[in-house]
Image (cartoon, helix red, strand yellow):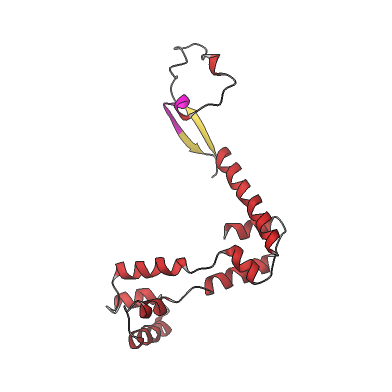
Amino acid sequence: MQFGIYLVRHGVITSDQFVDALDRQLHGRVPIGELAIKRGYLTMHQVFDVLDRQADDGRLFGQIAVDAGYLTEPVLNDLLHEQAEFVPSFRNVLAEMRILPDDVIQRQWRAYSDTLHVRSESAVQVETETPSADTPEGGEPDRSSVGRTPVLRDYEPCHVRSLSH
């Protein structure tokens, strides 16, 4: 979904195209009842019973199946994980719907990935809480490390504070 938001913010797709693609992606997943039947966890009669109850109270299929004693929580979790594996990627949905050509999708994906990499490098600020071994009490820090790339051990002891709020 974040990639889709990136595309909208950069004017590559419209918000309507984003919503259409997201809708297609979410509705493209295999229903839990279908997976449960294929795996032998539920019968067709049980699936119809759950769907009938769902029409009355609007709860999620899995919640109703567990409450009815048809599925256990661990089995439902397994089915949900399996269902997630079948959800097409947003990039594939954009291509299937012909919203963007493959080359544009790939180019935009690389640009989006680059922004994630840059953000991850700049989104963390390391603050030294106490003088380091290089800093004499009340004195100036040892400047012998100036010009080299710092590594994590250079900042011990420290805490990391995210700059994004």
Task: State the extent of the magenta-drawn residues as a range.
Answer: 153-159
- When asked about the image quadrant of residue 75, the answer is bottom left
Identified at 58% across, 44% down, the residue is 117
Compared with 80, 143 (above or below) is: above
Q: Is residue 24 left or right of residue 156?
A: right
Magenta-drawn stretch contains 156 = yes
Compared with 8, 126 (above or below) is: above
| x then y, percent, for residue 66 | 31, 75
Magenta-drawn stretch contains 26 = no
| x then y, percent, for residue 155 | 47, 26
Farthest residue, direction right: 11
Identified at 37% across, 74% down, the residue is 62
Farthest residue, direction front: 103
Q: Is residue 83 left or right of residue 67?
A: right
Say which of 154 and 95 sits in front: 95
Identified at 66% across, 58% down, the residue is 7
Quadrant the N terminus occupies: bottom right
- When asked about the image quadrant of residue 99, the answer is bottom right
Q: Is residue 144 left or right of residue 44?
A: right
Identified at 55% across, 64% down, the residue is 89
- Total tally of numbered discs in the picture: 0
Say which of 51 and 3 sits in front: 3
Say which of 158 and 42 sits in front: 42
Quadrant the C terminus occupies: top right
Compared with 117, 11 (above or below) is: below
| x then y, percent, for residue 68 | 29, 79
| x then y, percent, for residue 90 | 58, 64
